[in-house]
Amino acid sequence: MDLHVDDYQFHEFFLEVKTHNIGVVIAIWSPIVLVYFMDAQIWYAIFSTLFGGIYGAFRYLGEIQTLEMLRSRFESVPIAFCQRLVPYHHNRKRPLDEATERKNIAIFSLVWNKFILSMRMQDLINNRDRDLLLVPSSSSDVSVVQWPPFLLASKIPIALDMAKDFKKKDDADLLKNIAADEYMHSAVIECYETLRDIIYNLLEDEADKIIVRKICYEVEISIQQQRFLANFRMSRLRALSNRLDKFLGILRSDMEGDVTYRSKIINVLQDIMQIITQDVMVNGSEIIGRAHLNGGNAQYDTKEQRFEKINIGLIQQKMWREKINRLYFLLTVKESAINVPPNPEARRRITFFANSLFMNMPCAPKVRDMLSFSVLTPYYKEDVLFSYEELHKENEDGISILFYLQRIYPDEWDNFLERVPSVATKNKNDEPQNNEEIRKWVSYRGQTLSRTVRGMMYYRQALELQYCLEFSEDSAILGGFPDFEDDPKYIQQAQALANMKFTYVVSCQLYGAQKKSFDARDRNCYLNILNLMLTYPSLRVAYIDETEEMVNGRSQKLYYSVLVKGSEKLDEEIYRIKLPGPPTAIGEGKPENQNHAIIFTRGEALQTIDMNQDNYFEEAYKMRNVLEEFLKSHRNERKPSILGLRENIFTGSVSSLAWFMSNQETSFVTIGQRILANPLRVRFHYGHPDIFDRIFHVTRGGISKASKIINLSEDIFAGFNSTLRGGYVTHHEYIQVGKGRDVGMNHISALEAKVANGNGELTLSRDVYRLGHRFDFYRMLSFYFTTVGFYFSSMVTVLTVYVFLYGRLYMVMSGLEEEILENATIHHSKALEEALAIQSVFQLGLLLVLPMVMEIGLEKGFRTALGDFIIMQLQLAFVFFTFHLGTKAHYFGRTILHGGSKYRATGRGFVVFHVKFGDNYRLYSRSHFVKGLELIILLVLYEVYGESYRSSSLHMFITVSMWFLVGSWLLAPFVFNPSGFDWQKTLDDWTDWKMWMGNRGGIGIHPNKSWESWWEEEQEHLKFTNIRGRLLEIILAFRFFVYQYGIVYHLDIANHSKSILVYGLSWLVMLTAVPVLKIVTVGRRRFGADFQLMFRILKAFLFLGFLSVMTVLFVVRGLTISDLFAAVLAFLPTGWAILLIGQALRPMLECLYFWDEIKELARAYEYIMGLILFMPLAILSWFPFVSGFQTRLLFSQAFSRGLHISMILAGRKEEDNISPIKHA
């Protein structure tokens, strides 16, 4: 403050004032003060990462991270399952006897098999994987536990090699080596006993059976007397194993009716018996001889006549075929089973289910005693089931949905063809059924209502199975329920109990209108919803019915909330409730859609499920455990009012963007909400799939606030309402529900904008005010930094960049920075710059990655987390997150200034193909492009006008993060746009953009068709703002006048003059531009259509006048080329400021008939911005390798699974869309 500066490089108004250096202090310290505002958010990110990881570890997350870890602990999985998911196994410390243990394993096996079969029906695994994962339905005839074959892979071949190479003569050592591996021990005993039973029961002749019994007796007595190595030749076991493989392979084949089938079995069986008795057994001939004597039949004089009578019918029985298949896998499957199942989603589900069994959860009650619950899903008019035409409809690249999904999920398509072989054979008779199956296969991989309904109906399947396990005899459980699905008594009782405990209501508000509509899409939605009700008889659909009735002699529209179900009459009405008016016209659509249907729900609990969610059978089985949380007392004997559940984002494998979004969302619904619930106690309701205490909320305001605009983010207000009314919110991670997210850049941006708008409205709401008054100080801080504070910090991050650069611009243009750096008495500025450089790393929003890395490390291992982190950075994740930092800041700030948020449809497609340049420009022009170009001008001026006196490159290190910010904001939409650098598409985009810029707007013209319509729509926030908002908009626009004031004094034509007249004369340029703009506008309006020649002559005169003025300035006044470029940087911001002020003062300018001039000025600026953005895009598109690199960058996740995106984007598809997909 004491530094006296006389040599200002522009006109200083307050030179004699002692505090004239206050501008320097503000310029230097303001960014640092703003950084301190962000520090708390930074420390919260670090705290949540560390504490969330430690707390998650104590809750046993990541106990089982991989299938290898599951194999090592699989023996304890059935015990953990019964302790937590079976009602009558609550005493965990009591030792289990053998009968109870076998029953536990039988119960677990039944549920496990249902789980595996559900994945097979979803085509996540094939038939071979299914057989390797299934546990035998009946294990009472084997003396050891029958583990799934994937655990026993290679155990028999290893045991055979161990026995063959065993050099010692002591049986005990060999048996000890085999028994050291429990899985190997079980596999050896099971193979022996199963093979014995198969051969024995396959033979019909008693003499043959005697031989088998003798052989088995010899084996068992030799083991008992420890003479096995002496009585059997181990070197011949490999030959015996090969013949057994062939024998079991014949038994598994489908040749029961062929005559040669019997002869093949007999021949191989005789070979097996010959190898056993002559090669393997030392005294095998004596056994055959004794069998001759005992048989006493002359027809068996030779060995070739034996083993000819076999029971072929045995092989056709289901139980024996299971035994044969299992024995075949035990003998033949080797290392290949280690990677079973290969599908990553199947592996994730298996490991999470097994891991959850070791986590803390309430004990399962009996089905009759569990809380009843309902599931509510709001639906508008999204896709229900894709039509056959939609599957084959090609986009501009020649790609259909079906073709795309066949490439995205090649293994699942192969599994589908194996499950429905008629699709591959293309049988004409089965074509309607095949088309229906294909429609379902595609729809179950999208974010459709049919996928959601199928997932929620697993609750019902789980309840029915739980009933049967509880009310069945031990013998039935150990027998594997062979007749369960065919027993009417079980079925009826289980269904009745499931109806009492579970209700599913889908609120399809437009169902009635779709039913009456003649539009093809509406009719298709109606028929698909009706088909869902017929497929799932327990499904209920609620909708709003609009009717016209005569009331007091006058026709009046009446509205009803109607509940229907599927029946023989297609849809049958159950209830009809009259409404006071159209609810969705009064409030926000989605919450009102929930509110009108909540009355049709039943039970003590209510789970809210969005339309883009999924569920899994194994997770549905844990629902009754979760509901017990409502009965547990927590803090101060309070019981929960909302149970938070974690989500699994199932859309992460489509592209890099989908992977980034999946990881970010996964970290929020796991480690983020874990911290919010405990210890911060500020978790609310962040959307689906939380479970509400239905009685608590129905009597206290419901689950959805629906006021327009202010309740845009309606989900969190339910949590606010619950907390304000004395409720308590918890979070539980031993159960998960599937969730779909947006996978394209523009869809993700729309979602981020919607959430940022919602948080802006949240800041203005009375609920936040009330919570702030009722929370203690520390809980209030936790509440702030985990809700609106996060978005405020994002806005402050961007604001810090602006304050820093405008401060530096002031110091550079005024000459103060040069004076400070050259003054020997000042040494602190450099230290301050270094502090800013350190903080700049945190200003890019990369702290979002910390919780993400911790959660991945906790659940998958830190080596995997590190690898994922590196791959994400190589795929430009930092660009993605930095870009969306701008999205949050823009929409949150605009909402704070003007309000007027609106719902933004994000879209739920599979993937976004190439987006046109015009679409990207419309979406990001105001939120990113304008701000990015402004920052470029600031950075360029800072570099150019400060270069002459800097002795180091420290300033470059300070601004490097800001250059990166600018690059991210300007280029990210094109970098993450598929085929964004394809030359032909770039040319098409340019043509489309020029046509859009030239089209005139008007009433009914969509913004996508005309620049004028879009420009009008972009100013909607100013139409509804108040005088405060307009005034703030004008004040913010005044910053653009700084450029002209600072630059004109540095022009060569100014001759180093510091007079205020220099600035005043510079405004002559702007005053001259105004009448020129007026002339062009009037000329275009009056002469543009009918007098083209006159209009061209007018423009020629203006151009010649411009050249004349420029010539005089160059020759007479000494104008230079550098002055010309500097003037462009000076006057462009001034024009933009005039444009912004004009938009804020639109009513006044319209009265002055000057609005058309503002519009033409805006059009000129849009052309300039479009050209600046398009130039690097066109240059990069010229080089073919850039497009290939970009494709690899975007879709490398899918490449690892055999995806040929380059072929898809180019439209080179195979002739046969339904052929099996071969892996690359």
Image: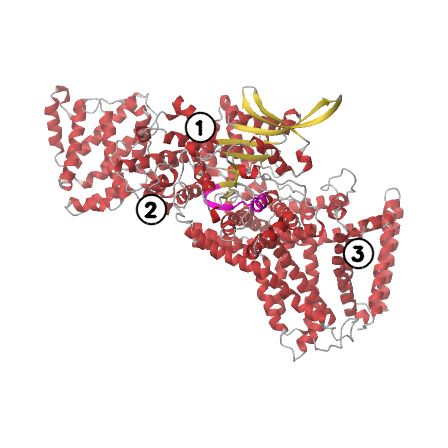
Q: Which residue is mark 1?
A: 497
Q: Residue furthest front?
A: 636
Q: Crowdedness of circle 1 by 10 Å Cα count: few (<14), some, many (20+)?
A: some
In three-dimensional space, the C-alpha distance between marks 1 and 2, rounded to whole angstroms, equals 38 Å
Q: Position of residue 1022 (x, y in %)?
A: 75, 48
N-terminal label among 3 and 2: 2
Helix, strand or loop for disc 2? helix
x 62%, y 37%: residue: 395
Residue 1070, by quadrant, is bottom right
Helix, strand or loop for disc 3? helix
Looking at the picture, which amino acid does disc 2 mark? Ser
Q: Say which of 327 and 881 sits in front.
A: 881
Q: Residue furthest bottom?
A: 824
Q: Position of residue 1170 (x, y in %)?
A: 71, 51
The reply to whether the magenta stretch includes residue 731 is yes
Q: Which residue is mark 2?
A: 72
Q: In this figure, which colouring scheme has been used for the structure? A: secondary structure
